[in-house]
Amino acid sequence: MAFLFIRAQQVFFNTIQYLVFLPVVLLLYYVTIPRYRWAVLFIASCVFYMYFIPKYILCLFFLIIVDYVLALKIDAAERPPRKKLFLILSLVSNFGLLFYFKYLGFFTETLNTVLLDFFGKHISVSNEVLPIGLSFHTFQSVSYVVDVYKGKQKPEKHLGIYSTYVLFFPQMVAGPIERFSTLGHELKKTASFSFGFVKKALPLFLIGLFYKAVIADNCGEYVNQTYASLSSQHSLNVLIAVVFFSIQIYSDFFGYSLMAQASAQLFGIRLVDNFAFPFFSRNIIGFWKKWHISLTSWFRDYVYIPLGGNRGTFLKYAFNIALIFSLSGLWHGAGINFILWGFLHALCYILTLLMMKQLGLRLPAILGYVTTFILVAFIFVFFRSGSISESIAIFQQILLPADGASFLPVSIMLCVNLLILFFIELLAHKQLSYSTFLSKNPRPANTVLFLYLLFAILVFSGVDNLPFIYFQF
Amino acid sequence: MRYIVYILSLAGIVLLADQAYVRLGLYHDDIKTCNAELLYQLDSLKNTATVLYFGESSNFTAAGQDSSKHSISEILAEMHPEQSIRGISKGAIHASTFKALINRIDAPSTVKTVIVTMNLRSFGINWIESELETNLSRAEILYSNYPPVLKKFLLTFKAYDNTPLFKRNDIIRSHYKGDKFKLSNQEFTSVYEWDKQMYDKGLPDAHGNKDPEKTNIACHFIKNYAFVIDENNPRVRDFDAIVALCREKNLNLIFHVLPENHERAVELCGTDLDELMRQNVTFLKNRYGKASFFISNYDLLPDSVFIDREWPTEHYSFSGRYSVARRISESLISQTKTRL
């Protein structure tokens, strides 16, 4: 039983530590009197976070205090310029920290290329490790302060509840990005333990784990193997890797989101759906309504609509779309490749709009699904590569095969599981979420599904140590 | 009644999964993916060999111009045709891996004696927190005696030390600063101070200028050997466990401390480093001398037989491997006389 005493450096959903951590927190939560249950979640969240790099909790505490105080100040201020000043202070604190950790390195590297060319000098590059989930909780905190500024949200006076809203461990590191109006309300509910929670949560956790361990990790092994020696790969391998990466990132992130929802559900807390079967979209517009919903809606509410949204000329509308998609790319990572990834999505989005509005063109469902998938998969090449030149190399490798390259076979069992997943999604996608799908499914069908998922996780899961992709953001 | 059906269904699925995992060849695939092929080697040898030699790359690494590429265990086997001596070795493995493998030797087995390599460098933080550690730790799950489906479960849920590399580097740095030692001739009390001074000042070349390559090697020697082994060292805990396992399994145990390039250590870093290394050997001798047949080959070999010149290793040319084998052979003979 030595595995129970291994050194735990990260407590993620697919680790043995989490299988111990979660029940312990649950037990403590329900034995604590309802008034103080937030404290259990708060402490558990701190522990969860500090397993990674303990000192970074101080950054979080700093932001929590700043936003908590400034939100109260915004609410108390009578003159709009003062309200605005407090808002700006909050935005500077939040985005300043994000910039320092995530973008300063990229910014100084870019600046260095100019400085070296013209002055022969350079600035030393910051190489701080990114605190996990920084982009997520920054956006979550910003949404709260902006909502208070706009008068949509009353400031939270209970520091403990507000802190728990920012730190809530199931969604702190990779979302969904929750609004205070929903998660804050959920945290204040003090539901008694119900087996109903477990009945709802366990299937979701199992499905999430299937996505991550069976689909994402196995696809990831193939992708990593192919990309590690790209120049000697058969073009078919690269093509499969391109397709597999889009399946990997989807399964990885959707799997994470489902496990986050399941974990929260055990505390009687509902998190928003972050995905709604995006690969069953007829076009890229539909795709973005179903992919990473909490981030898309954040950009819609806090950037796109304040910019004017779809009002004004088509050119202005298109500019707004291009801007928010490029920003979304930048949110994912500090690199031109991420910005290009966002921009290409914007381009497809605008072209689809033009096709639909000007030409009245709509693709039949199946053709639409296939086209959307192919588009998304190829644009993801920019996301996966470390640079634009690497992305170009991938496309070149597909079009200009390497001499004597051998075909890297795909595991039959992975194909079988992909097919099974496809059928599950085909049945579930009209319900838009697994919770709804499972609640409408007959019980024997659910039982068969769960037994298969359990079997698949025990037999087919990948063994490579692949962390959740979105933790790096 | 409903819950009984649930539990039985779950048990059925687990049993089915166990069978499917092995029969579909996925267990074998995982062994390959996790580089845990030593499992097959051990399972085939534990019923044929009488002596098993556990080692890392020092066992089999040979120089290009070697007259014979035979490993230490092979030379030893040639010296003792009356015994069936076989080597189980793989680069970078250490006491924790040896422990997991020895734990698999269950009765009935033909193995009577195990020879376990003690590599001084493996007690240092550089090796303890090496980037290879995550994979080695993962492979140990497969060496365990658990049913295959449980191993798969543990692999899926990362029940091994999967500390990220940046954290390992942080840990190494903090040990460089925090682990203290006392030297006879110099005032440094930590790797950090010693290494910094060596790096800043440097070692001179023939013309008295700073020799970057020589300085670099000296820094590597300091980082890899300047530490004090105590009972809290994870390797010591693993070797303790090996002693206990051998007692439990009634196996004769021979520990042998690998030769280190003490001449080069003195040449590059002065006698202090050599003293520190000797102190560590003494610690090991005091701790394991009674519980096992303990051989110290620390200063057995001259600098000339060490193959790698840019990095401190325990890789020897044929004459070096032969000398090590001969010393173990003598101990094996003496042990046979006293114990068997």
Image (cartoon, coloured by chain):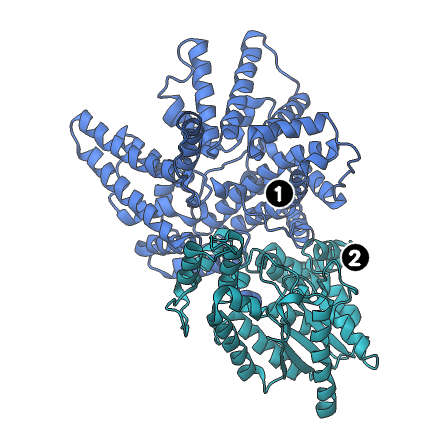
Q: Is residue A340 above or below residue A453?
A: above
Q: Residue at x 66, y 55 (%)?
A: A458
Viewer-nearest residue: A451 or B81: B81
Chain rendered blue: A
- x%, y% of residue B147? 69, 65
C-alpha separation, residue under disc 1 versus residue under disc 2: 23 Å
Q: Mark yes or no: residue A153 visible.
A: no
Q: From the top left corner, tell me how far across and down residue A32 is, in percent.
A: 35, 60
Residue with the mark numbered 2: B23
The quarter of the picture where residue B198 lies is bottom left
Output the chain of dot 1. A
Colour of chain B in the rendered structure image: cyan
Q: Secondary structure at mark 2?
A: helix
- Given the image, on which type of amino acid does mark 2 rest? Arg
Where residue A275 appears, as percent x and y from the top left, is 53, 35
The amino acid on which the numbered mark 1 sits, given as a three-letter code, is Ala
State the mark number for residue A216. 1
The quadrant of the picture occupied by the N terminus of chain A is bottom right
Residue A28 in view here? yes
**Does residue A89 appear to the left or right of B94 in the view shown?**
left
The single residue placed furthest to the bottom in the displayed view is B338
User: How many discs mark residues in the rendered view?
Assistant: 2
The residue located at (34%, 52%) in the rendering is A38
**Residue placed furthest toward the left:** A78
Q: Secondary structure at mark 1?
A: helix
Q: Nearer the viewer, residue A26 or A392?
A: A392
Chain at tag 2: B
Placement of A417 over or under A360, stated as above or below: below
